[in-house]
Amino acid sequence: MALKFRWRKWYAKSNNLSEQRVFGERPNIVISTCFQAAWEKLIKYMDIDAKFIQPSYKDFKINTDEISSAIDDHTIGVVAIMGNHYGGQYDPVWEINDIVEKVNKDRGFQVGIHIDAASGGFIAPFQEDLPDWDFRLKNVLSISASGHKFGESCIGTGWVVWRQRENLSDHVAISVSYLGGMGESYNLNFSRPASGIYVQYYKFLRYGISGYQKICEHMMIHAQKIRERLRKNEI
């Protein structure tokens, strides 16, 4: 939604349109067909078209050759999946960033990248020799991760981190003063249990960087053993 409202503001200014007129324009998002169901809900519920790019069956990564032609002046963003739920493959964010940078420069767009790291958000930071994939890349605006997966928190705990406040708060924040002071809400539902937050905070303090590093290393060892056994047709 932040990407959608961000795009509306840019599109209205670029085409000298009123806010009311922009409501009649239907935006789109560029994403691999390895998307998770949450993206289908966004597309269906929020009136956003999808420009699907089918990955190769050989590597399950988004075909970067098709991204540039898929982007137009109605594109709110490109989604890069860091750890799809079929085989855990990463879309090459570092390549996508270069493509988006060139498109923005050549066509005068402001398309950004969202990293869907629901599966890889607690894995990629602890893997060596991985190219830059996060906010070190200019066009990455936001990154999501599932705390209830490899962050080892409670079910329903998820995280979204924005590059900078203006890409979020100016577009979707709702100011509230229910508790005697001003606060901001970003959820569709206002009241939520805090158990996941507490558990995740405890895990951050208990494990630390070294603890999550060990968890990642153990998972990679197990994954490698499973791959080796599968290749031998012993399972």
Image (spheres, grey):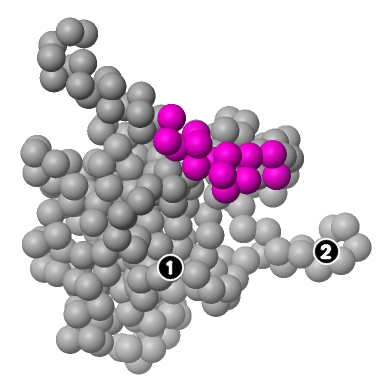
Q: In this view, does 152 lie to the left or right of 8?
A: right
Verify whether residue 224 appears in magenta.
no
Residue 150 shows up from this direction: no
Give me the disc on residue 177. Answer: 2
Q: Which region shows up in magenta?
A: 205-218
Residue projecting furthest to the bottom? 16
Quarter occupied by residue 224: top left
Q: Where is residue 201 in the image (x, y as percent from the top left)?
A: 70, 44
Q: Which residue is drawn at 69% across and 39% down?
A: 206
Q: Position of residue 94 (x, y in %)?
A: 26, 64
Q: Position of residue 45 (x, y in %)?
A: 41, 48
Q: What secondary structure is marked by label 2?
A: loop
Q: Which residue is drawn at 21% across and 44% down?
A: 33
Quarter occupied by residue 20: bottom left
Question: Disc 2 marks which amino acid?
Answer: Ser
Dot 1 crowding, Cα within 10 Å, few <14, some 14–19, many 20+: some
Report the front residue among 223 and 143: 223
Question: Disc 1 marks which amino acid?
Answer: Phe
